Amino acid sequence: MLAMLAACQPAPVANRSSQDEAMANAATPAPVAQPTGVAALPAAQQLDRGFRAVFGQASPITDKDGMTVKAERLLWQDGKAVLITSSTQADACHACAGSLGVYYLRPEGDGFNVAGRFPKAVAGNGFGAAPDWSVSDKFGAAPVIYAEAGYTGQGYSCNSATLTELTQSAPRTIATVPIYYSDQGAGGSTDVTGKIGKVNRDRDFTVDYSGSATFHDLWRRGPKGYTVVGESKMQTC
């Protein structure tokens, strides 16, 4: 009888505290590294310190050419910062364009050191105006400044969109796309507007045109940036 009872005894149970500890450790996510130094400051303070690192004083300033330079945005890219500034001038001449500046910064304690200066990275409009711009991540892994600027003269108006890729070390123009043309001020009948359509990251994008004519262009990426496929119907100044 004792032998039968012994055979019916349950198998020994493994140490539950060890099992629970192992499961808890497996379920615990790795700690996320917290930003330190200047990267831990509020965005407005980061922007201010980035501008001071480049220009030695707070935004805005007036440079040697009489342009008003203003801090616009600071981006982080793989541990480095990129400062974007605008340069404008009131009452400037028709052909005097504003611009966007791009500056690469290395974080150092609670501030920055300047690693690269590109004060006129993106051209703007006449009369000292900066371009209309935004930063996009839809074109590829690196952020891209999408900037629109234009010109009007003798009844003709043209606008173009410039795509400037913020690489690891320098801004790089990867496309200049015509997005507006009109000759109506000169007595013509053409008035066409284009806008970026479908984008396949790092591959291609379409430009959809409408107005007095409707058509589409395909821009494909190559080693030096994007170029239009075939011949575009879009007129330029």
Image (cartoon, rainbow, N blue to C red):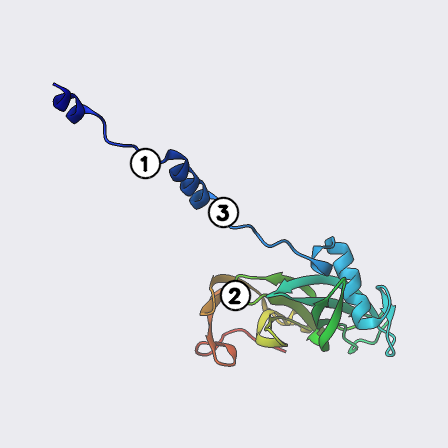
Q: Position of residue 67 (x, y in %)?
A: 84, 73
Residue to which mark 1 is pinned: 14
- What quarter of the picture does the N terminus occupy? top left
- Can residue 128 be seen? no
Quarter of the rendering containing residue 47 = bottom right
Q: Is residue 120 above or below residue 111?
A: below
Quick one: which residue is furthest to the bottom in this view?
224
- What quarter of the picture does the C terminus occupy? bottom right
Residue 139, label in figure: 2
Q: CA distance from mark 2 to mark 1?
A: 55 Å
Q: Residue at x 44, y 76 (%)?
A: 229
Q: What type is the residue that disc 3 sits on? A: Pro
First in sequence: mark 1 or mark 3? Answer: 1
Q: Residue at x 52, y 66 (%)?
A: 141
Q: Is residue 71 above or below residue 118?
A: above
Quick one: which residue is furthest to the top in this view?
1
First in sequence: mark 2 or mark 1? Answer: 1
Q: CA distance from mark 3 to mark 2?
A: 32 Å
Quarter of the rendering containing residue 191 = bottom right
Residue to which mark 3 is pinned: 29
Q: Position of residue 25 (x, y in %)?
A: 45, 44
Q: In the rendered view, does 108 fall on the left or right side of 223?
A: right
Of 199 and 196, nearer the camera is: 199
Q: CA distance from mark 1 to mark 3?
A: 26 Å
Quarter of the rendering containing residue 12 = top left
Q: What type is the residue that disc 2 sits on? A: Phe
Q: Are marks 3 and 2 in contact (CB under 8 Å)?
A: no
